[in-house]
Amino acid sequence: MGHWGWRALIVASVISVWVAGCNLIGDSTVSIAPTSSPAITLTIGRAADRASPSPPAPAATLAAITPMMPSAQATIATDDPALLQFGTATPVPLVVEMPICSERPGGGVSCLGRIGNNLPFAVDRVVVDVGLIRGDGARILESAAIEQGMIPSNAYAPYRVLFDAGWGDFSGITVSLQSADLAAADTPLVALPVEDSQVELDGNNARVTGVIVNAGADDVQLSHAVVTLVDADGHVLAYRVISLNEESLPAGGETPLNVTLILPDLEAGTLPQPSIYIEGLRQREN
């Protein structure tokens, strides 16, 4: 085999998206964070103990969307996460969707998009670069990290990039992945499912409800929720991050979730669909 012997080579494909010359859209898609946060009440219980009262009928009720399967299939040369759990200079291949940008009230530009993970493992340390292109070809670049600790397999995370720049000066947008790593196999982070998710619309207010379920064998210390609303084409309309006050959810337990988001003005017939990411820390007994 020679003096050096055999060396294994693992090649990771990198997907980045470069979109130039795309038209930015007007005020109708601006996502405005709520000026006040409604109280979030978590009542911890076990699944067998939950009563089943009949809630009032919402104005509009939608089922939760299924996990996103990006159209571009990404592959890696190994299926062993232990070989790829360390920080890398080259991001693992993810699908970065082009954001929707709009003028912010009071000036500036807001861009909302999402990043899809089509790999068989969770990923973390995800950062995206978004650039606004001027008419003369110059570009203003901003970076943003996702607001959740990881993106589970076959799921996505929203991102938001804000520009302190004039709206009328720009004619296009670029987007690319700056960093992303496979999450460590022994990460204490856990993403809990949400059952019975629904959306109730009242003007520009969207009330999202559901039941957080801990179906695992360990108690989980709840950290935060990322609640996203998308349109039928998967474009992010709004998202909100809320603290879950580090409540402990026992194995087999569940707790209700109730979050209000403010939507932009929507076209007639647009029904936003919810996606809810619940993050916590697994509490293993020593």
Image: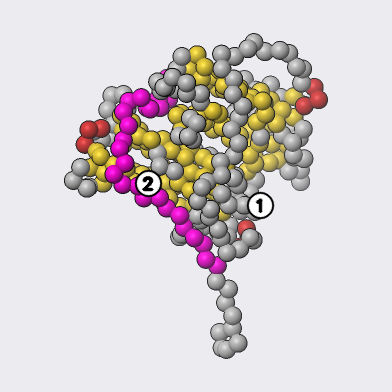
Query: In the rendering, at what x and y percent does residue 36 appear?
Result: 46, 18
Q: Main secondary structure of the magenta part?
A: loop
Compute the Cα span from label 1 to label 2.
31 Å
Residue interval drawn in magenta: 10-36
Figure check: 153 above or below 262: below
Q: Which residue is pictured at 74% across the width and 36% down the height?
A: 215
Query: In the rendering, at what x and y percent does residue 17 appear?
Result: 40, 50
Amino acid type of disc 1?
Answer: Asp
Camera-side mark, 1 or 2 = 2
Q: Viewer-proximal residue, 27 or 39?
A: 27
Q: Which residue is pictured at 57% across the width and 64% down the height?
A: 77
Badge 2 is on which residue? 175
Q: Which residue is pictured at 46% across the width and 28% down the height?
A: 238
Q: Assign the N terminus to one quadrant of the image.
A: bottom right
What secondary structure is marked by label 1? loop
What secondary structure is marked by label 2? strand
Badge 1 is on which residue? 186
Q: Which residue is pictured at 58% across the width and 57% down the height?
A: 85
